[in-house]
Image (cartoon, rainbow, N blue to C red):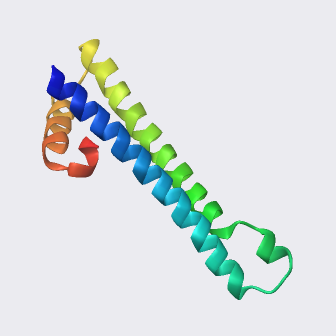
C-alpha cells in the first residue's frame, strides 16, 4: 500500500515537472522565434503556443473518439447484442495494437 502511494506521488511530481518544462520550452521557443521577426502583428501572435494548443486539441478529440468507440462496444457487450465476429475483432485489436490500448 505504501509503495502505491509513493508511485502515485512520484508520478504526480514527474508529470508536474514535465508540464512546467514544456511550458518553459514553449516560452523560450516564442522568444527565439520573436528575435527573428520584425515588429508587427506576426510578432505579437504566440505561434508556438498556438501550434501546441492545436496539437493538444486534436489529441483530445482523438481520445474522445476512442472512448466513445469503447463505450459503445461495452454497451453492446453488456446488452448481449454483440456479434461474435465483432467481439473477436475487439479482442485481437486490444491485444495486438499498442495504440489501441492507450
In the depicted structure, whether residue 14 falls above or below residue 39: above
Q: Residue at x 33, y 31 (%)?
A: 70
Looking at the image, which is closer to me, 47 or 1?
A: 1
Q: Along the horizontal axis of the image, is 63 left or right of 97? A: right
Looking at the image, which is closer to me, 50 or 85?
A: 50
Residue 93 sits in quarter: top left
Residue 10 rendering spot, x and y as whole percentages: 28, 39
Residue 37 sits in quarter: bottom right
Looking at the image, which is closer to me, 91 or 3?
A: 3
Residue 91 rendering spot, x and y as whole percentages: 15, 36
| Observer able to see residue 94 | yes
Q: Along the horizontal axis of the image, is 36 left or right of 2? A: right
In which quadrant of the rendered image does the C terminus lie? top left
Residue 53 sits in quarter: bottom right
Q: Give the number of marks.
A: 0
Q: Along the horizontal axis of the image, is 59 left or right of 30? A: left
Q: Residue at x 38, y 45 (%)?
A: 15
Residue 75 rendering spot, x and y as whole percentages: 33, 18
In which quadrant of the rendered image does the N terminus lie? top left
Q: Residue at x 71, y 66 (%)?
A: 46
Q: Along the horizontal axis of the image, is 4 left or right of 61? A: left
Q: Residue at x 58, y 73 (%)?
A: 29
| Observer able to see residue 83 | no
Residue 43 rendering spot, x and y as whole percentages: 78, 76
Please identify the residue farthest to the right as the structure is shown. Answer: 40
In the depicted structure, whether residue 32 falls above or below residue 83: below
Amino acid at each position: 500500500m505504501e509503495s502505491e502511494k509513493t508511485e502515485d506521488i512520484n508520478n504526480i511530481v514527474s508529470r508536474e515537472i514535465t508540464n512546467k518544462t514544456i511550458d518553459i520550452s514553449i516560452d523560450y521557443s516564442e522568444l527565439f522565434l520573436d528575435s527573428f521577426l520584425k515588429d508587427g502583428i506576426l510578432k505579437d501572435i504566440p505561434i508556438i503556443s498556438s501550434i501546441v494548443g492545436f496539437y493538444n486539441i486534436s489529441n483530445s478529440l482523438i481520445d474522445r473518439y476512442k472512448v466513445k468507440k469503447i463505450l459503445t462496444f461495452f454497451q453492446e457487450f453488456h446488452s448481449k447484442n454483440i456479434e461474435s465476429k465483432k467481439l473477436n475483432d475487439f479482442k485481437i485489436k486490444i491485444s495486438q495494437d499498442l495504440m489501441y490500448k492507450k
